[in-house]
Image: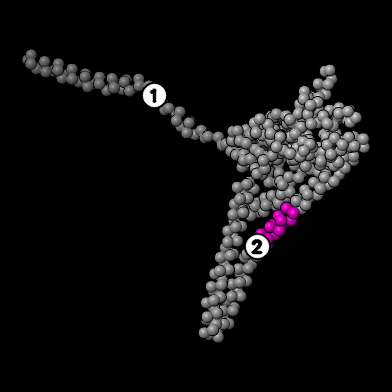
Amino acid sequence: MTTTRRTAVVLVALLLALVAVPSVAAADIGDTPPLQVDDTNATATNQSTPDLGTADRLRVSPVTFGEGWMETRTIEADAEYNTSGPFAVFALSEPAQNVRIAQSGADARLLEGDQTVRIDYQDDAAESGSTYFQLELFFEDGSSTSIDLTATQTSMSVASTEYAAYSGLIEDMRDEAEERGYATTPDGLTSLNEFKTERVQLVESFLIERAKQLFSTAILIIQNPLAWVVGLLSIFLVAYRRESEHSQMLNIIENAASATRRKQQQLAAAYQNDIQTANEEDIAVLDEIDEQQKIYLRNAFDVNTTQQLCNLALDGPYSSKTDTMTDGGEQTSAIGQIDADNIHDSWLAEGFSTNRLKGPQETLSCIRAALIRAEVQYGLGHIYTEARTDVEELLEDVQQTESGY
């Protein structure tokens, strides 16, 4: 009886335990907090990198002309350049909508094609030392950028330089490059020239091959009369096709070479004519020199023409450049060797001694007038600009020294 009761109690306990377990599990599941999904990566994935503007893709290449008096030196690519000369040209990798320079003394403009910028400096933009300018470029997508420019030696005359003579030819080559699908940059023009050279070589090799074909055809003609007829027709058709393909290129090459020779001859003739005219022009035609001053200058230095008076300032009274070297070994003008303190003991004193010109200022003024005439009228600034600068500086120093007495 006791055993039966204990067995019943155990069974009741087991039943109660089975009923309690599902309730506890349900309670645990209900208390579990909901899962949260981290969508940070999804948001980052949906974000796209913004496209770069035209200004960010821009590459700037200075155009050089192989002249010692005009140079563009890269300080920082696409950002900063030092230029010397009256103008500078830059090629752009992207077409610009507008360009400008806010500072006075320089102007910027886009050339045809909108991928070439020319900066023209005024003569007094950098008379001594250097001057800073900022070139601003604007593009169709609204982006913009700027380039820092440091200009020097902007007063040099380019009226008779080779670039002025070749500028038309360069523009023609740029137009031709654009028509043929080449870039209008220096590299593009070089590629076009290489293309023309290859075509010429192709034509030359073609002539050799055609000679071989004619020789073989001649043998066939001798052996077979029918081959005579066929050969002649073949030669005619081949020659016609070849000439049609290459005649235009040959005409372009021949015309370009002829135009270049004519322009070179015209430039040389104009330059020699200017030198001859300056050498024959009497100094009395200058407004700053009267007949009396002409006589004094002739008696003192044996000069009669504009160029002779210019050469006096450049080389000295004996037309010798052996004494016009500075301590550093650089060439300078004869006037550059004189200063306000020793002018009364120099060779220039011969012009304002007793019974001659009034003094150093009058003598220097006459020489300066001749130098300006040579630059403006005859385009000889590349020869006499340095001498004119030395005369003007010495004249200013003499005026200050004499006013202080």
Q: Position of residue 358 (x, y in %)?
A: 89, 28
Classed neighbour count for the residue bearing mark 1: other residues with Cα under 10 Å, few (<14), some (14–19), many (≥20): few
Give 173 or 327, whichever is nearer the viewer.
Answer: 327
Read off the residue under disc 1. 34
Q: Which residues are magenta?
A: 248-265
Q: Main secondary structure of the magenta part?
A: helix
Classed neighbour count for the residue bearing mark 2: other residues with Cα under 10 Å, few (<14), some (14–19), many (≥20): some
Q: CA distance from mark 1 to mark 2?
A: 84 Å
Query: Residue 250, which numbered label?
Result: 2
Q: Residue furthest top?
A: 2
Q: Residue furthest right?
A: 291
Q: In the rendered view, does 217 fall on the left or right side of 297?
A: left
Q: Residue at x 55, y 82 (%)?
A: 221
Quadrant housing the C terminus: top right
Q: Position of residue 270 (x, y in %)?
A: 79, 50
Quadrant housing the N terminus: top left
Give 320 or 222, whichever is nearer the viewer.
Answer: 320
Would residue 255 be counted in the magenta stretch? yes
Q: Is residue 80 above or below residue 185?
A: above
Q: Position of residue 41 (x, y in %)?
A: 44, 30
Give 213 or 374, whichever is nearer the viewer.
Answer: 374
